[in-house]
Image: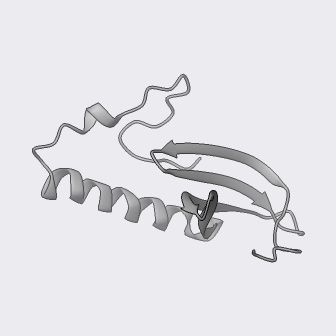
Amino acid sequence: MEDNRGNDRDEIYSQRVKAGKRTYFFDVKATKSNDYYLTITESKRRVKDDSFVYEKHKIFLYKEDFAKFVEALNQAVDHVKHDLMSDVDFSQFEVETSESRFDDELKWE
């Protein structure tokens, strides 16, 4: 079990994405000085003995790295879509949302 005393701040915003056996959490949190950062958590449910346990991996992303992170993510996804798997119709994996703020690229406002 992780000891998160003092590390977990109040969540300002949270978005959950279910993806098969994995769930991704995008949480905006505040520092003591009211600066904001994003945590991206991957949670995987695993069977252990006769019960389930959750294995978690977390990334902390700070405001000064938002643009670089989004650019690198978009470039990596585009490389897979256009260079490695150009024969796959990725539109079958798209999810329609009522708040369709993102077109083909992620944008930080």
Give the residue displayed 71% in from the left and 55% down from the top. Answer: 28
Q: Which quadrant would the N terminus be assigned to in this image? A: bottom right
| Residue 107: % across, % down | 49, 47
From the viewer's side, name the closer residue of 85 and 63. 85
From the viewer's side, name the closer residue of 61 and 85. 85
Give the residue displayed 81% in from the left and 77% down from the top. Answer: 3
In the displayed structure, does residue 23 sit left or right of residue 36?
left
Q: Quadrant of residue 34?
A: bottom right
Q: Farthest residue to the top: give it.
A: 98
From the viewer's side, name the closer residue of 22 and 7. 22
Q: In this view, does 13 lie above or below 93?
A: below
Give the residue displayed 55% in from the left and 27% down from the top. Answer: 99
In the displayed structure, does residue 14 sit left or right of residue 19?
right
Across the whole image, how many numbered discs are drawn on residues? Answer: 0
Q: In this view, does 51 lie above or below 57?
A: above
In the displayed structure, does residue 41 sit left or right of residue 85?
right
Q: In which quarter of the image is residue 95?
A: top left
Give the residue displayed 39% in from the left and 46% down from the top. Answer: 105
Q: Is residue 12 above or below residue 97?
A: below
| Residue 69: % across, % down | 48, 65
From the viewer's side, name the closer residue of 58 and 69. 58
Q: How is the image coloured?
A: one colour
Q: Farthest residue to the front: give it.
A: 50
Q: In this view, does 32 lie above or below 78?
A: below
| Residue 54: % across, % down | 62, 61
